[in-house]
Image (cartoon, helix red, strand yellow):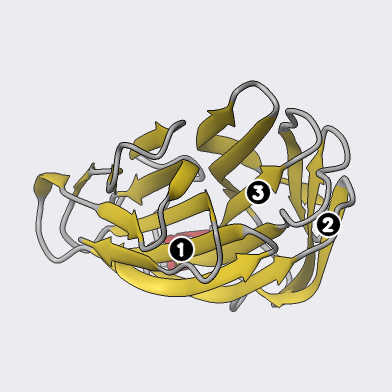
Amino acid sequence: MTMFASQWFASLPFGGSNTANATSTSSAAEHTFSDQAIGDSGPTRVIAVAVGMGVNSANRTIDSVTVGGADLTKRVGAVADNSGIENFRAEIWSAVITSGETADIVVTMSGTIGSNRGVAISVHRLVGNVSAAPDATASDNDDDGTTDPLTVSVNTETNGYIICCGVSFKTAPNTASWSGATELTDAMTGNIAQTAANHSATSDETPRVITVTFTTGGNCQAAASASWFPG
């Protein structure tokens, strides 16, 4: 019996991995992260990008995320608002991207984001019998610095994969501490603490409790998570 390439690839064990992490301190509306690793190609491969951003000039949204020119779809997002003047966003975007092992990843906001804020990305590859959209998502935000840690608990299935990201407007130096997920990156873009984490599930949990705590006092923080189940 002949097995087509898409059938063969879908029959592979489900799995996810972090392929790249990058930051930008530009105040521009468009941020290009050149030649980012996205892993081996395949006909059912899903690329997910977690994005953190902050604004100090006016409220902005993340309008698009592209990988090699292909549009991703926003799956979950959290926003923390500082008196209607600034906002800070943690979002996860994804799509089926079949070709390429490296790609330019472009994050476009609705306008310039001002100084001392910046953008960070965490790139993930999912393979096997996987859909572009996650099976479970969660988000949490804090506008005044009184709710710490942030909680982004999601359901899991054995052999599934979770992506998490967080952003905090707090005075440097500032670091994040994750519980329930493995920290991948912890960086500052100006005055914004940027962090990402992942988890490869070994059991079904309803939910898996995931939290992120930032070390320095301040205000405005947001976090999001997305969980994919084996097909």
Q: Residue at x 52, y 66 (%)?
A: 125
Q: Residue at x 73, y 28 (%)?
A: 59
Q: Is residue 218 above or below residue 190?
A: above
Closer to us: 150 or 42: 150
Q: Nearer the viewer, residue 107 or 75?
A: 107
Please say if 231 is above or below 187. Answer: above
CA distance separating discs 2 and 1: 18 Å
Q: Is residue 155 left or right of residue 58?
A: left
SS state under label 3: strand
Q: Position of residue 67 (x, y in %)?
A: 75, 58
Left or right, 54 with reference to 93:
right
Pointer 2 residue: 31
Q: Quadrant of residue 8?
A: bottom left
Callout 3, which amino acid?
Answer: Met
| Amino acid type at mark 2 | His
**Quadrant of the frame with the N terminus:** bottom left
Residue 15 in view, yes or no:
no
Q: x, y percentage for residue 197? A: 39, 65
Identify the mark at residue 128; answer none if there is no mark.
none
Distance between mark 1 and mark 3 Cα atoms:
13 Å
Residue shown at 22% from the left, 62% from the top: 179
- The mark nearer the N terminus, 1 or 3, is 3
Q: CA distance from mark 2 to mark 3?
A: 11 Å
Of tags 2 and 3, the one toward the viewer is 3
Check disc 3: other Cα within 10 Å, few if <14, some if 14-19, many if 20+. many
- Mark 1 = which residue? 196
* Amino acid type assigned to the residue bearing label 1 in the image: Ala
Badge 2 crowding class, 10 Å Cα cut-off, few under 14, some 14 to 19, many 20 or more, is: many
Residue linked to disc 3:
53
